[in-house]
Image (cartoon, coloured by chain):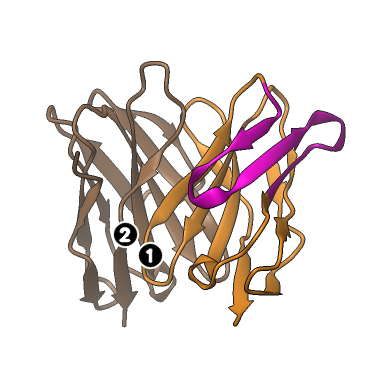
Chain colours: A orange, B brown
């Protein structure tokens, strides 16, 4: 069955600290992987995507993610978190026309 | 380029009523998908339309339906509303040709009382 697991429901980091959000997926074929961010009361904004090629992908707002096929993981990282990064982050796996989302990780940033 | 727009942004309905939500995709995007977001179930895929045809459907009852017009705009309809239908309904569009990423609108917050 296709699924996405985000093990951390809530994460709190200090401003300026590094961040890693975990994502594990189960998907029969070659996965298309995505990270989205959602601020309160807003829709989802695409941070980055992986389709093929270089397993380290760069996204917007200074985020990057690394695809590890052997671990079925696609973890999101940022070297230095800003207060404005506080939001909910969703990992998703998709085929041609449908996305399957993880439960999300809510990020809080302490000043 | 304007993003995905959804109307209305907020809606309050009573159990048993029906509701229609509207979505206008990014210009040039021909695929529209709908998702339901609730605290308990998270983000769940409802259906996807391309060229006015439903191409994929999630695991939702028949009370949830949709359609797409020739200009790619889409509507979804929920009939006989239940309390559990209260959710944020998100629309996403995709260009389709050689593109797999979906771009989301701000959503319609539906409250059923």
Tag 2 and tag 1 share a subunit:
yes
Is B18 located above or below residue B69 in the figure? below
B84 sits left or right of B31 in the view: right
Q: Looking at this view, is B61 or A32 the one in front? A: A32
Residue numbers of the magenta segment: A54-76
Image quarter where the C terminus of chain B lies is bottom left
Q: In the image, residue A72 lies at what x, y percent?
A: 80, 37
Q: Looking at this view, is B15 or B55 the one in front? A: B55
Image quarter where the N terminus of chain B lies is top left
Say whether residue A64 is magenta: yes
**Residue occupying image coordinates x 73% and y 56%:** A20
Quarter of the figure with residue B24: top left
Q: Name the residue tied to disc 1.
A: B88
Q: Which mark is residue B107?
A: 2
- The answer for which chain carries disc 2 is B
B103 sits left or right of A37 in the view: left
Q: In the image, residue B36 lies at what x, y percent?
A: 43, 57
Helix, strand or loop under label 1 = strand
* Mark 2 closeness class: few <14, some 14–19, many ≥20 residues within 10 Å: many
CA–CA distance in space, label 2 to label 1:
6 Å
Q: Which mark is residue B22?
A: none
Say whether residue A4 is magenta: no
Q: Earlier in the sequence, mark 2 or mark 1?
A: 1
**Residue occupying image coordinates x 65% and y 28%:** A31
- The answer for which chain carries disc 1 is B
A23 sits left or right of A62 in the view: right
Q: In the image, residue B75 lies at what x, y percent?
A: 21, 46
Q: In the image, residue B13 lies at what x, y percent?
A: 23, 75
């Amino acid at each position: 069955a296709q699924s996405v697991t985000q093990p951390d429901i809530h994460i709190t980091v200090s401003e300026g600290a590094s961040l890693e959000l975990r994502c594990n997926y189960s998907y029969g074929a070659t996965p298309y992987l995505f990270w989205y961010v959602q601020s309160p009361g807003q829709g989802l904004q695409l941070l980055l995507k992986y389709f093929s090629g270089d397993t380290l992908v760069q996204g917007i707002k200074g985020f990057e993610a690394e695809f590890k096929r052997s671990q079925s993981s696609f973890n999101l990282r940022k070297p230095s978190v800003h207060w404005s990064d506080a939001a909910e982050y969703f990992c998703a796996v998709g085929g041609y026309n449908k996305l399957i989302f993880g439960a999300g990780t809510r990020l809080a940033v302490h000043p | 380029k304007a993003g995905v727009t959804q109307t209305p942004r907020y809606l309050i309905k009573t159990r048993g009523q029906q509701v229609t939500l509207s979505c206008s995709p990014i210009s040039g995007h021909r695929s529209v998908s709908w998702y339901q977001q609730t605290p308990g179930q998270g983000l769940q895929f409802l259906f996807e339309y391309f060229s006015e045809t439903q191409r994929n459907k999630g695991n939702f009852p028949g009370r949830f339906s949709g359609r797409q017009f020739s200009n790619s705009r889409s509507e979804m309809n929920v009939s006989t509303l239940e309390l559990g239908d209260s959710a944020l309904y998100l629309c996403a569009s995709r260009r389709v040709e050689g593109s797999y990423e979906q771009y989301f609108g701000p959503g319609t917050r539906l409250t059923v009382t």
